[in-house]
Amino acid sequence: MTLLDTMIQLGKNARAASRAMAKASTATRNQALLLIAAAIRRDAAVLTAANQRDLAAAAASGLDAAMLDRLTLSDKSIAGMAEGLEQVAGLPDPIGEISNMKFRPSGIQVGQMRVPLGVIGIIYEARPNVTIDAAGLCIKSGNATILRGGSEAIHCNRALARLVAEGLSGAGLPADAVQVVDTTDRAAVGALITMPEYIDVIVPRGGKGLIERLMRESTVPMIKHLDGICHVYIDDKADLEKAVNIAFNAKCHRYGTCNTMETLLVASAIAPQVLPLLAVRYAGQQVELRTDAHAAAILAGYPHLTDATDADWSTEYLAPILAVKIVSGLDEAIDHINTYSSKHTDAIVTEDYSRALRFLREVDSASVMVNASTRFADGFEYGLGAEIGISNDKLHARGPVGLEGLTSLKYVVFGHGEVRQ
Amino acid sequence: MTLLDTMIQLGKNARAASRAMAKASTATRNQALLLIAAAIRRDAAVLTAANQRDLAAAAASGLDAAMLDRLTLSDKSIAGMAEGLEQVAGLPDPIGEISNMKFRPSGIQVGQMRVPLGVIGIIYEARPNVTIDAAGLCIKSGNATILRGGSEAIHCNRALARLVAEGLSGAGLPADAVQVVDTTDRAAVGALITMPEYIDVIVPRGGKGLIERLMRESTVPMIKHLDGICHVYIDDKADLEKAVNIAFNAKCHRYGTCNTMETLLVASAIAPQVLPLLAVRYAGQQVELRTDAHAAAILAGYPHLTDATDADWSTEYLAPILAVKIVSGLDEAIDHINTYSSKHTDAIVTEDYSRALRFLREVDSASVMVNASTRFADGFEYGLGAEIGISNDKLHARGPVGLEGLTSLKYVVFGHGEVRQ
């Protein structure tokens, strides 16, 4: 059997399983989640052993420390996977909800029903916990899924796949509702993204290089996260304390996350007041500031000061580095953001009502905030209960994607024998 | 300037115009629509003259009668374009609506704002009225658009483009908010579908061949309509009169529309009663019935009877031809539909409550109906006010696509200085 045959078989299995999932009751899907959680707790030692094999191979092949860290399953992360499934089981069921049923002049009643998307392909790095997070969200939302995790996690993912299949079967659901691609051959990804007849949507989670390749090659629609070049704009009508707290938190709360601020824009009228206050905070964290000439003049003497180049306005540092630009006011700030932002999350700090409304309306990003840290752009902080990723796309799901993002609305019509005149 | 340069320039113009459109007020966008409508009425003779040039060229090149018919602008269709714009101006504005603003434990308040998608590329056949319909829906929904109509309508589309630009400018909006691709070079389509940096979504309206090409080649997301293989299933608990009326209307109301029934499924227990009644109605319209052996036995003597082949279950006839299959009951009907349907519109006729609910839930199509003709799957019948097309996709817009389908929901956060803990 060639790799392509194998992938087509996975696709056919998933399509068949998706039909059973779509009609499974809320209780059945929740039962599967709880059975999987119990199996993970029971087999923690098995999972740890499988993870040790992955870690040994990864260390031998010279994987870097950060990747080894993400690959590692601790006792705590194993318990976390089980708890995550239990939390998802406790969320409201999005499936089957019927809304907006309205009578039309013809006599028919028309509304919409929320239904699963069908089959979801998820492509991610060597992070075993994502296998369980993704499986849990797909089961809860009535979808079948094909999971393609980083090959370094293959032993752990195989062990997890067995537990997921056990839980699905135990609840009377098809084990094929969650399939793990059991090969380290990278061509599997190429097959997965070109099977629109079997896969309804691809959710890629990974670096920019992977996503850009998928954008070129995929014939299956994607819910994708590209990068996070997030801005905070401090307006001249900002409250100084809020401005300093937000701009510090948005940069320094965590450096490696996509909702971290990468560029700070400051209105020229407030820059002489706010930048020195911020400099004190940033200096304590040794944040490098890459600034335009105007900001450099105000920040003269700051210990980690560099001249910004044009490239800095479109760089996602994921590090203690911040681009800083002085702007004349709101219009220039919005222009800069709509030009350089990755359309992820952007915030204004202001006490001016009209400017706040204009920023909310005119900044074309998935999350737009007034007087709050960009770090809040997150499925849990937004109350979605869980998150499969954050979408930079405008179609379908935008921003943090929870269970609803894995569903679709179809039209339902209640008739009484009506025919078209 | 090469064609690609020209297309890139159109893209840049559209992107710039989209920002002005996104912040334009409801009144301004409606004013543009009304000014365009008035200009169309004023220049009806100019439009007719331009259309005559197109028609003469098309007749000389041997265009078939149906295409000539669609290309023709009558006085009535010119008035219809103006009226359509006035109706769209009267619809509620979807843009700027803020919903579900909820406080979170952190203190931030999170909800969603409906905003334009940005730039919409529309590719369609030689139907001048689509130029105005599409322009109107894009202006109303705050989007910029690039229109690529069939080359046979180029003179008429140029004349319409001038009137649209006049109306936009008159309302103070950028004329580039609606641009018509002013070349008959087919390579323009290839450029349009591979400019994701300038175009946010492609809406193709055309034959299956065009759509399949775009699916292979487009790197821009699409809202697309593939085909309409629609089913009616007559359950053995159906009311006979409703069944006959619906199955007759779904086939014979109009043959060439995508929501016309192409396959009739009949439960074996009711087939001996219902098929002879239906045969009388279909015979009056000389409908050819392509049936399985079981149905053929019941319909023996019907004047236009043919044996169905496997290909009939997946053929969109758009003609007075109907595939007929006897099924054992609901399960087989749902299986058949989920296998052969184009996921457009499918209906059940039954008086059984539980079967109706199962059909609604389990049939994986954009519109699912109980006791109503599939011909109701339409933006106007559903109360959307207008329709840019009907989507067979599951992501974003599914089924008839109105103004909301041309918008996106972004998250908005009202904060009070909150930072992430």
Image (cartoon, coloured by chain):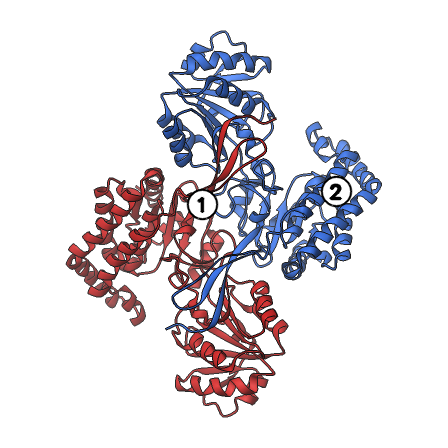
Chain colours: A blue, B red
What label does residue B408 carry, if any? 1
Q: Nearer the viewer, residue A350 or B227?
A: A350
Q: Nearer the viewer, residue A119 or A196?
A: A119
Question: What residue is drawn where x is 74% and y is 60%?
Answer: A172
- Residue for badge 2: A82
Q: Quadrant of residue A325?
A: top left
Residue A2 visible at all = no
Mark 2 Cα shell of 10 Å, populated few (<14), some (14-19), many (≥20): many
Chain letter of mark 1 equals: B
Marks 1 & 2, CB-CB < 8 Å contact? no
What label does residue B2 carry, if any? none
Q: Amino acid at mark 2?
A: Ala
Residue A67 in the image: state x and y as whole percent.
Answer: 69, 32
Residue A321 visible at all = yes
Disc 1 element: strand
Question: What residue is drawn where x is 44% and y is 30%?
Answer: A340
Disc 2 element: helix
Chain letter of mark 2 equals: A
Residue B44 in the image: state x and y as whole percent.
Answer: 17, 58
Residue B254 in the image: state x and y as whole percent.
Answer: 38, 74
Tell me: residue B250, above or below residue A342: below
